[in-house]
Image: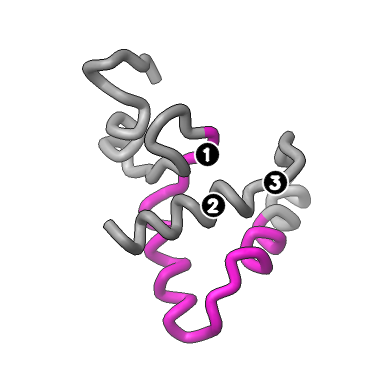
């Protein structure tokens, strides 16, 4: 991404099919398709983003990926999911 005042990162990510975890300086972008899947999943079961994020992180670890932050993805994914559902 090339970020400038005329093309904020959040707008560029949305145009690419990703929803940012924050409007300014996002550190995680989630596929709109994945957010749609999670929304449908949570219609049929109690919403539990912590359990979902921990399961997804475990899956990614098996695939060789790892989150480099203390809090993992839960807070950032929860923000993205919350605003995806609201907007």
Q: Is residue 8 left or right of residue 53?
A: left
Residue 63 at x, y percent in the picture: 72, 47
Residue that numbered label 3 is attached to? 72
Q: What is the distance, in whole Å, between disc 3 and disc 1 at their CAs?
A: 10 Å
Region in magenta: 27-56
Q: Which residue is drawn at 26% across and 36% down?
A: 15
Residue 18 at x, y percent in the picture: 38, 43
Mark 3–mark 1 contact, CB under 8 Å?
no
Dot 2: element: helix
Q: Which picture quadrant has residue 74?
A: bottom right
Q: Quadrant of the C terminus?
A: bottom left
Mark 1–mark 2 contact, CB under 8 Å?
yes
Q: Residue 28: which disc?
A: 1
Label 1 neighbour load within 10 Å: few <14, some 14-19, many 20+ = some
Q: Which picture quadrant has residue 11?
A: top left
Dot 1: element: loop
87 w.r.t. 15: above or below: below
- On whether residue 52 falls in the magenta region, the answer is yes
In the image, farthest residue toward the bottom: 44
In front here: 9 or 38?
9
- On whether residue 44 falls in the magenta region, the answer is yes
In front here: 37 or 87?
87
Q: What is the distance, in whole Å, between disc 3 and disc 2 at their CAs?
A: 9 Å
Q: In this view, does 55 lie to the left or right of 22?
A: right
Q: Earlier in the sequence, mark 3 or mark 1?
A: 1
Residue 86 at x, y percent in the picture: 31, 61
Label 2 neighbour load within 10 Å: few <14, some 14-19, many 20+ = many
Dot 3: element: loop
Residue that numbered label 2 is attached to? 77
53 w.r.t. 23: above or below: below
31 w.r.t. 16: above or below: below
Residue 10 at x, y percent in the picture: 35, 33
């Amino acid at each position: 991404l090339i970020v400038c005042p005329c093309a904020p990162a959040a707008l560029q990510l949305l145009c690419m099919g990703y929803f940012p975890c924050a409007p300014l300086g996002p550190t995680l972008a989630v596929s709109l398709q994945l957010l749609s899947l999670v929304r449908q999943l949570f219609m049929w079961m109690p919403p539990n983003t912590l359990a979902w994020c921990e399961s997804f992180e475990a899956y990614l670890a098996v695939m060789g990926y790892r989150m480099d932050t203390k809090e993992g993805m839960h807070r950032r994914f929860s923000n993205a999911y919350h605003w995806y559902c609201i907007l």
